[in-house]
Image: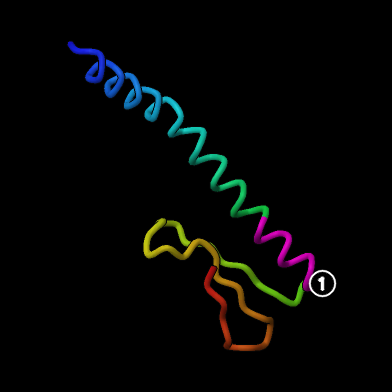
Amino acid sequence: MSEPDAQAVESEEDYRDKLPSAGRMAKAVEYLVASACILASRGELNAAMSLVDGGGVDLVLNRRGSSATLAV
């Protein structure tokens, strides 16, 4: 294998090694953002997260007693 090919294979392996921890960190940040929004609003905001990650929306916030939503 040539030098560039070896580097490409090595970088793919590095990516796969980091993938599980990156996903865990991303989910932790989503929970952190949701918690900060709820606390900053003194409990007036509700936060909802989807089970399936798709469409680019990680968090949906809405004020209690209102139908308006904010997708983040």
Instruction: Note whether 49 is above or below 18 in the view shown.
Output: below
Instruction: Note whether 65 is above or below 31 in the view shown.
Output: below
Residue 13 % position (x, y) = 34, 22
Residues packed near mark 1 inside 10 Å, few (<14), some (14 to 19) or many (20 plus): few
Residue at the far top: name it. Answer: 1
Q: Residue at x 30, y 19 (%)?
A: 7
Task: Please tell me whether residue 27 belongs to the stretch shown in magenta.
Answer: no
| Quadrant in which the C terminus is drawn | bottom right
Instruction: Note whether 46 is above or below 56 in the view shown.
Output: below
Residue at the far front: name it. Answer: 3
What residue sits right under mark 1 in the picture?
42
Residue at the far right: name it. Answer: 42
Overall secondary structure of the magenta stretch?
Answer: helix
Q: Quadrant of residue 11?
A: top left
Residues shaded magenta: 33-41
Residue 43 % position (x, y) = 77, 72
Mark 1 secondary-structure assignment: loop
Residue 26 % position (x, y) = 54, 46
Q: Residue at x 61, y 49 (%)?
A: 29
Position of 55 compared to 58: left or right? left
